[in-house]
Image: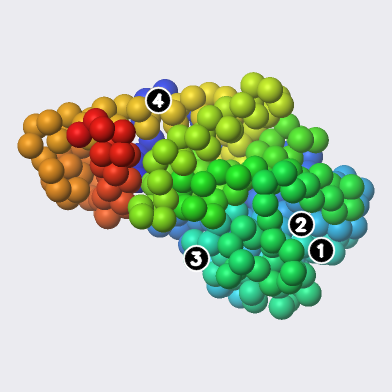
Amino acid sequence: MTDAKALPGRPRGGVLSGAATARAVNVLAPNPSAMTLDGTNTWLLSEPGSGLAVVVDPGPLDEGHLRRVIDTAERAGQRIALTLLTHGHADHAEGAARFAELTGTHVRALDPALRLGDEGLGTGDVIDIGGLELRVVPTPGHTSDSLCFHLPADAAVLTGDTVLGRGTTMVAHPDGRLGDYLDSLRRLRSLTVDDGVRTVLPGHGPVLDDAQGAVEFYLAHRAHRLAQVETAVENGHRRAPEVVAAVYADVDRSLWPAAELSVRAQLEYLRDHGLI
């Protein structure tokens, strides 16, 4: 979910639907909006030559979309063996129970309320399906249950809503916390530096082929917004809606409710650090 339009210098990418890497195919859900950009990216992952596939974020409860995901796998000679969730927002997870019913798969997520089956997901978990390796990366901040999935064989990371393919994401206060989000961005930056991750496979928007540039942009953007919020408070704007009007004046008003959640998270962060 986005809280700001694309800004100058934003890393750009391509591919909205279809093959993105050797192991990742995107099936775009038909739910475009100001918050979901082009729609939710449902990721179908498999090791080349394997008959098994993993699906990340089945998306909304849209029967046609869920069946297109299954058809895409079947045309490639694959059976879907597992469903994973990056987080519990409806545009990513609402269709998970029905998708599990259609495919006979378990659903694994950080939040126990979203799981179907005995296994959840946690820090350090490695998923191996048909030779495909996915490493679980905890990235709270957008929401408390947000996860990313590192696909080392493709030097890629699936980021859900933590990093988008266009624009920037919101910190969904009070569940999401800015301090956690900044730590998560630094964790992703470490993946680009230490583990050679080059490609971002986001939950919305196009694939990004400069992962480090994208994460650096997000960190700079957050620092810039935080400074703007601090200045707005110094100028007498104490309430979140007032800060939104001052700081997000250049952003489409349809996104102001999401911006207000991020502002509340920023105000909390500034208070916790004694800066206001």
What amino acid is at disc 4?
A: Ala
Q: CA distance from mark 4 to mark 2?
A: 33 Å
Q: Is 156 left, or right, of 131 in this rendering? A: left
Marked residue nearer the N-terminal end (1 or 4): 1
- Toward the viewer: 164 or 228? 228
What amino acid is at disc 1?
A: Ala
Q: Is residue 133 visible?
A: yes
Find out whether the residues at labels 1 and 2 contact each other: C-beta distance under 8 Å. yes
Q: Which residue is mark 3?
A: 90
- Circle 3 crowding by C-alpha within 10 Å: few under 14, some 14–19, many from 20: few
What amino acid is at disc 2?
A: Val
Q: Which residue is mark 2?
A: 54
Q: CA distance from mark 1 to mark 4?
A: 39 Å
Q: Which residue is mark 1?
A: 81
- Which element type, helix, strand or loop, lies under badge 3? helix
Q: Which residue is mark 4?
A: 220
Find out whether the residues at labels 2 and 3 contact each other: C-beta distance under 8 Å. no
Which image quarter holds the C terminus? top left
Depicted 217 relative to depicted 114: above or below: above
Q: CA distance from mark 1 to mark 3?
A: 22 Å
Find out whether the residues at labels 1 and 3 contact each other: C-beta distance under 8 Å. no
What amino acid is at disc 3?
A: Ala
Find out whether the residues at labels 4 and 2 contact each other: C-beta distance under 8 Å. no
Marked residue nearer the N-terminal end (4 or 2): 2
